[in-house]
Image (cartoon, rainbow, N blue to C red):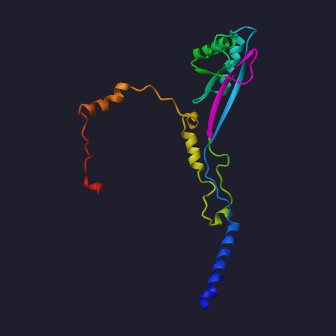
Amino acid sequence: MLRKTFSPLLAAAAVAALVACSEVLPEPRMTKEPQITQVTSLHAVRFAPEGFQVSPAEWDRLVDFLLDLRLREGDRIMVELPMTSDGRDLAGRRALAVMQLLARQGIVAEPFALTEPGGQVLRVGVERVAVNASADCPDWPEARDFGAFVNDALPNFGCASANNFAVMLANPRDAVEGRALSRADVERVTLGLRAYRVGKNLPFEPLPYSEGDE
């Protein structure tokens, strides 16, 4: 009889304790991750009406624009070419003239289209990808916040990994898109298959054994 009386009381006390705990539990913290941003800087190259040759003054302005940006690994150089252009009209000849001048300086550019027409100017864009740690890293709050044992990650969790990833990434664009596969050596790729078909595949040889491996 005594056991039956205390069972509902214990259950009610447990529910009340859980409710009380749920009111003080903070929201779980998210792990810090690398932040990826893409920024495109535009420069207008002016042309004479119906002209497609880049004047020395405009070329100097374009060079100063590129020097100020300090081009680095992963930057994408783009030259405006309307989608309606067939490459032989005035817009296409202007784009080709700029791309040829850049190529002489070892700068490979690719065409891109903008939604609005450029008129008597041609836009040259530099698209840059930046990878950095989260803006709130490092994140070490006051010591009193570590006194709540709520089975939660520390607020700084992930900052070191995000920062190291950003520092070690040689080409920031790799964090946005993969690289195109290079042309494969067909003879080298098929060498193993050819040896297998003619029965010249090498036998498997285990690594040397030593008693220290036990």
Q: Residue at x 65, y 55 (%)?
A: 140
Seen in the picture, residue 7 relative to 15 is either above or below; the reply is below
Task: Return the x and y of residue 181 as percentages of the image width and height.
Answer: 48, 29
Q: Residue at x 25, y 50 (%)?
A: 209
Give the quadrant of the N terminus: bottom right
**Residue 13 falls left or right of residue 202:** right
| Circle count | 0
Range of residues picked out in magenta: 113-131
**Residue 105 falls left or right of residue 55:** left
Quick one: 8 or 205, which is closer to the camera?
A: 8
Quick one: 115 or 213, which is closer to the camera?
A: 115
Quick one: 119 or 74, which is closer to the camera?
A: 119
Seen in the picture, residue 120 relative to 192 is either above or below; the reply is above
Residue at the outermost bottom position: 1
Quarter of the rendering containing residue 70: top right
Task: Return the x and y of residue 164 as percentages of the image width and height.
Answer: 56, 44
**Residue 117 falls left or right of residue 99:** right
Seen in the picture, residue 54 relative to 42 is either above or below; the reply is above
Q: Is residue 118 part of the magenta span, yes or no? A: yes
Task: Return the x and y of residue 177 as percentages of the image width and height.
Answer: 56, 34
Q: Is residue 172 part of the magenta span, yes or no? A: no
Quarter of the rendering containing residue 26: bottom right
